[in-house]
Structures are given as structure tokens and as C-alpha cells.
Amino acid sequence: MAFAPQDPRIPDPNDPVVQDGRVDYVPTPISVTRARQHAARLIAEWGHPALADDTALIVSELATNALRHGHVPGRLFRVEL
């Protein structure tokens, strides 16, 4: 009996977290672009290129929200994967 390959978007609970990425950004519009590009590149480098576009979209939305609605003068915002 053949099994279908596991969906790469569903993490295996037996796999330990072996990579992480954390960057702090200045709350400016260009930082949203940089955060999106960096996140997509990391996900692809970590062996999940099929998830890079979805990751870029999510990071872009969250970074934009942080910039628009959570901006505190003198504070950075962080993107952590």
C-alpha cells in the first residue's frame, strides 16, 4: 500500500526546531519590504521554497500592521521565524 507524501506545509511534530531567524526593523515602510524578502529567503534556504510566497504575504501583513497600528516612537519591531 502506497502512502501519499506528507504535505510540506504541515510540520512533523517529531522534528525539532533546528533553525530560527530574528531581525529587528526600524518602523518605516521600506522595512516591510525588507522583512518580507528576508523571511521568504530564509524559508526557501531552510528547504521549504513552496512556502516562501505564503510566508512573505503573512510577514508583509503583520509588519504593515505593526507599522500602522503598533508603532511606538523610538521602538523597533521584530520578525522572528
Image (tube, grey):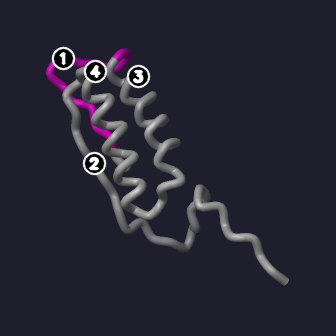
In magenta segment, residue 8: no
Q: Residue at x 26, y 29 (%)?
A: 31
Q: Which residue is mark 1?
A: 73
Q: Which residue is mark 3?
A: 65
- Label 4 residue SS: helix
Cα–Cα span, label 1 and label 3: 15 Å
The residue segment tinted magenta is 68-79
Cα–Cα span, label 2 and label 1: 21 Å
Name which of mark 3 and mark 2 comes first in the sequence: 2
Cα–Cα span, label 3 and label 4: 11 Å
Contact, CB < 8 Å: mark 2 with mark 4? no
Mark 3: give few (<14), some (14-19) or many (20+) Cα within 10 Å: few
Q: Which residue is mark 4?
A: 29
Name which of mark 2 and mark 4 comes first in the sequence: 2
The amino acid beneath tag 4 is: Pro
The amino acid beneath tag 2 is: Arg
Q: Which numbered tag is attached to residue 22?
A: 2
User: Residue 75 in the image: x percent, y percent?
Assistant: 19, 26
Mark 1: give few (<14), some (14-19) or many (20+) Cα within 10 Å: few
